[in-house]
Image (cartoon, coloured by chain):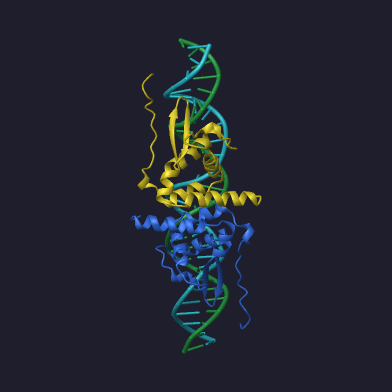
Chain colours: A blue, B yellow, C green, D cyan
Amino acid sequence: MSTASTRVLDHPEREEIRLEAVLHALSDPMRLQVVRFLAGLSGEEGASCSAIELAVSKSTTTHHFRVLREAGVISQVYRGTAKMNVLRRGDLDALFPGLLDGVLAADTAQRRRGG
Amino acid sequence: MSTASTRVLDHPEREEIRLEAVLHALSDPMRLQVVRFLAGLSGEEGASCSAIELAVSKSTTTHHFRVLREAGVISQVYRGTAKMNVLRRGDLDALFPGLLDGVLAADTAQRRRGG
DNA sequence: CCAATTGTACGACGATCATCGTAGTTTGAC
DNA sequence: GTCAAACTACGATGATCGTCGTACAATTGG
């Protein structure tokens, strides 16, 4: 088809994003790894699901990305056979200023200690 | 007995506190309520478990306090028949600067919006 | 010693979770 | 039209979670 893909994914609106859901989404090592990766990207690029190597099966990877999307942490859009993922930094920063950076900094600090 | 109580509770050392565990502990509304309450206290006072009215049974309350303690978010010490709870702000701020305040601010922001 | 207060231990319950494999769908490239 | 790549859907499984009630333990105050 030449028309745009009809495969559209459901994202919570900014106002629908819940702190508890975000914290829960970030409390898993795999998902934290995804967020860390996406946060390290410059600009609006984003990355496909397969660009981030997680030590779990493909189904599990899909699952983690969905949890992140449904919590409002990332947005996902199909592009060809790939699905591009972008951190919803604008929304998160608007809702919870400093939260995402705080978590990322905490993650960096913990890793630096050898965690 | 006049000797100090032998009822001692296990707390993770500062270096043992894990970010994922902290985030998980904070991702529950009841536990967030406890942390919010303790954060609102002045000085080193702390509060007994029963001082914080949670809309769950006593057993469940005990459970939530334990999760917070085992994650390193609070410290608990017996004092008579009561158990006093204190936020481990010093440890958390040292390990993850800005994280606790970020979460508390996010919680306040969400509540202000009517969440 | 007795009673009241405060919190625990121990199942138990249904719900959610992280994980997997297999079989499928959608797309882009040839 | 075929084929490979990328991701999904759908169970299934074992673990953990939040919740409860009941029964118990430790402490303080009369």
Q: Position of residue B56 (x, y in %)?
A: 58, 37
Pick the residue in front: A3 or A71: A71
Q: Residue at x 53, y 59 (%)?
A: A67
Q: Is residue A13 above or below residue D22?
A: below
Work out whether residue A13 or residue A50 is closer to the camera in this orientation and state it: A13
Check the image and name the residue furthest to the front.
B43
Front-most of residues A9 and B30: B30
Residue sitting at x 48%, y 37%: B43
| Residue A51 in sight from this viewpoint | yes
Instruction: Residue D2 in the image: state x and y as whole percent.
Output: 49, 85
Which picture quadrant has residue B70?
top left
Residue at (46% x, 70% y) in the render: A41
Image side of residue A86 versus residue B114, left or right: left
Q: In this view, does B48 lie above or below D26?
A: below
Rendered view: A97 above or below C14: below
Measuring from the top left, give residue B21's x and y in whole percent: 44, 49
Quadrant containing the N terminus of chain B is top left
Left or right of A32 on screen, residue B50? right
